[in-house]
Amino acid sequence: IDILRNYKLEIVSISVSLGFLTFYANYNNSYNKLEGERKNEHEKENYRKNEFPNKFPIINKIPVLRGVVKWAYKEGWYYSLGLLAILILAFILRVWQVGKLGLVVDEQFTYETARNLKDSLSFKFFDSGYYYRGWPYTILVAISFFFLGVTEFSLRLPGAILGTIIIIPIYLFFKENSNKRIAFLTSICCMIFTWHIFYSGFARHYILASFLLILSIYFTSKYFKSNFENNKWGSIVTTALMVITLKELLIIPTFYLIYIFIYKKFKINIGKDSI
C-alpha cells in the first residue's frame, strides 16, 4: 500500500494513458457501431412519423395533443414514457423538502434581491447597495415570489424546475451524438446525480448557468454540424444568457471561437455526421 501511495501520480498517469490508448484503438469500431444504430433509429422514427396520421386519425386532428402524442410515438413508447418517468422522479428528488432547509451561505443575496425586485422592481440588496450577479436567475425567483408568495419553497422552486428540465437537452444531445440507449442512461444518471440534486435546491444562479450551458452546447453543436447554416440564433442567445448568468463561463464561447477559427483557417469539413 505504501508503494502505491508513493507512486500514485505515476499509477494514475499510466491508467489514464492506457485508457486513452484503449479508446483510440477502438474508436473507429465504436463510432461505426453508434453511427449504424443512430441511422437505424432515424429510419424507424421517420417511418413512425409518416404512419402517425393514418394510425391515429382522431388525435391527428387535435393540434396540441397531436404534437405531443406524435413525438412520443415517433420517439418510441418505451423511450418517451421512460423519459417522462425520469422527469417526474427527477422533480420529486429535487423538490423534496426544499422549503425546510433554511438559508445558507450566499442564498440570502438571492432571497433579498428577488424580494426587493418583486416589491419595488429594483435589484437592491437590503439598503446597502444593488446586487446584479446572476440577475436572470433573480428574475425567475422574483416571478416565483409574485405567484407563490415570499417563502423558502418559492425561493428554491425555480432551481428545482431547471434541474429537472435540463434532462431534456441532455437527452437530445446524447441521442443525436450517440444513440437513444446512451441518451436514456445519461438521463437516468443526471436524475440521480447527488451533486446536481443539491445545486437544484440551492437558491443561487449556478443551476440556471448549467442549464444554459447544456442548451448552448446543444445548439452550438447543431450549428457546427450544419456547417454554420442552422441553429445560429439558438446558439447565440443561449450562449449570451449563459455568460450573463455566470461570467466565468465566458471560456465556453472562447472555445467556440477557437473552433471556428480553426475551421476557417484550415477549411476542415465537419459535415453533418462529424461532431
Image (tube, rainbow, N blue to C red):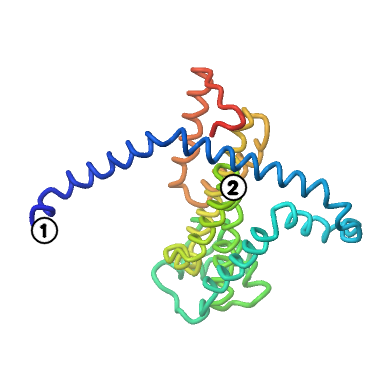
Residue indicated by mark 1 = 1
User: Element at badge 1?
Assistant: loop
The one nearer the camera, 153 or 68, is 68
Q: Residue at x 50, y 54 (%)?
A: 210
Disc 2 residue type?
Lys
Q: Quadrant of the N terminus?
A: bottom left
The one nearer the camera, 145 or 231, is 231
Q: Residues within 10 Å of mark 1 (few under 14, many from 20)?
A: few
| For residue 172, above or below residue 151 | above
| For residue 47, above or below residue 266 | below
| For residue 263, above or below residue 65 | above
| Residue 226: quadrant of the picture | top right
In the picture, measured across the screen, residue 140 lies left or right of residue 50, that is left
Q: Position of residue 123 (x, y in %)?
A: 55, 61
Q: CA distance from mark 1 to mark 2?
A: 42 Å
Residue 30 in sight from this viewpoint? yes
Residue 115 in sight from this viewpoint? no
User: Element at badge 2?
Assistant: helix
Query: Is tag 1's residue or tag 2's residue first in the polypeptide sequence?
Result: 1
Which numbered dot is residue 175? 2
Do callouts 1 and 2 mark residues in contact (Cβ within 8 Å)?
Answer: no
